[in-house]
Image: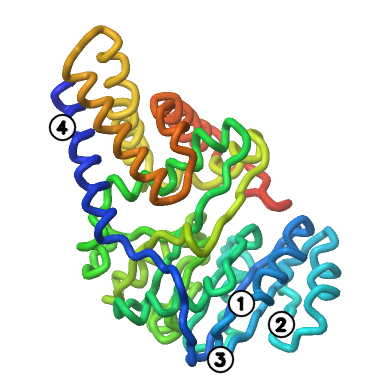
Amino acid sequence: MLELSLFLCVIALLITVLNTFSIITPREGGQVNQKISVLVPLRNEEDNAVAIVETLAAQENLDSVEFLILDDNSTDKTYELVSSTARADSRFRLIHGSPLPDGWLGKPWALKQLSESAKGEILICLDADVRLSKNAIAAAVQSMQKHCLDFFSAYPSQVARTFGERMIQPLLQWSWLSSVPLAIARRSSNPSFAVANGQFFAVRRSALESSGGYSSIKAEVLDDMQIARVLLRNNFKGTVGNGALIAQCHMYSSWNELRNGYAKSLWKGFGGVFGSIIAIALLAITGIVPILAAATGSPFGWLAFEAILISRVISAKITRSNLFDSLLHPLSAILLIYLIVYSWLMRGRIQWKGRTV
């Protein structure tokens, strides 16, 4: 067991190191002359409604851009706040969402309506809790062009304030930085290499339409990962990148909110029960076994623990996470295992934005 743990931890470290040299990191965006459509679905987002309009209105270096915001039947003040904030800017268009049809989940349905209303050559899908630098969209689009990609997910820096957030949120980026060889992924059409984050997702309109659009993922909880897989299966190229320099996202503000957020989708994240068991086993072998072995004086345990900690520190440095929190990786692994189990136990019973998921 210890030999396997050491092997896996060293492999994770090697992949992380290699990815530091190959990851796409958008920085400064020059002038973009393509028609861009920015799609933002909102449901009960009154806390983010004003800020998302303001961060979009501040975007620079875009010759032709439209901001399409869909109010998905909110029951709070989302529509009024967006309308009053954006009304002086002709680039914004606020859409009333149609009722949710049978067989659809909320976000794919909202994105379908938005994409059908869009006129741009490139669609930028954003979540309401994302905040952008002034050249973020231009930088993401130019990264797509430079690397000849059909889709590109500029993974935002994850803002983590509470202890629970700090233990879990940095694992999002570390999980793919330490397991997916990105230099290979961006040249491959193998769905196994799919990594994406719907917080900030850019896609060529022609590629999306050729792949069946959002109708192809209408009932998928993990809409971002699934649309990436659909695009790859249709021989389009794309990958994830480090968007920490151009975007940030504060997903959750409490442990209960974080737990429910993960509970609605984590059970789907590993492809089924077997995949979830494998994920739990890997978390235990690389996150818990090394520190337990190291505590007994095992040299293999110490080496494995050091390897996984270095991979976490590198990931934290790249993604602008808290370096100190990396030292608590065993606790992060335990909490994530709990969330995976909790997600399965609560499957189909979680209320999110007023809907059962």
Nearest to N terminus: mark 4 or mark 2: 4
Camera-side mark, 4 or 1: 1
At label 1, the amino acid type is Gln
Left or right: residue 52 compared with residue 295: right
Kindly indicate whether the residue at mark 4 contacts the one at mark 3 (C-beta within 8 angstroms). Answer: no
Q: Element at badge 4?
A: helix
Front residue of 312/120: it is 312
CA separation in Å, label 2 and label 3 = 15 Å
Front residue of 286/21: it is 21
Q: Which residue is mark 1?
A: 59
Q: Element at badge 3?
A: strand
At label 3, the amino acid type is Asp
Which residue appears at 50% of the width and 33% of the height? 167
CA separation in Å, label 2 and label 1 = 12 Å
Q: Is residue 113 above or below residue 62?
A: above
Q: Which residue is mark 4?
A: 7
Q: Which residue is mark 2?
A: 92
Q: Is residue 138 above or below residue 290?
A: below
Nearest to N terminus: mark 3 or mark 4: 4
Nearest to N terminus: mark 4 or mark 1: 4
Kindly indicate whether the residue at mark 1 contacts the one at mark 4 (C-beta within 8 angstroms). Answer: no
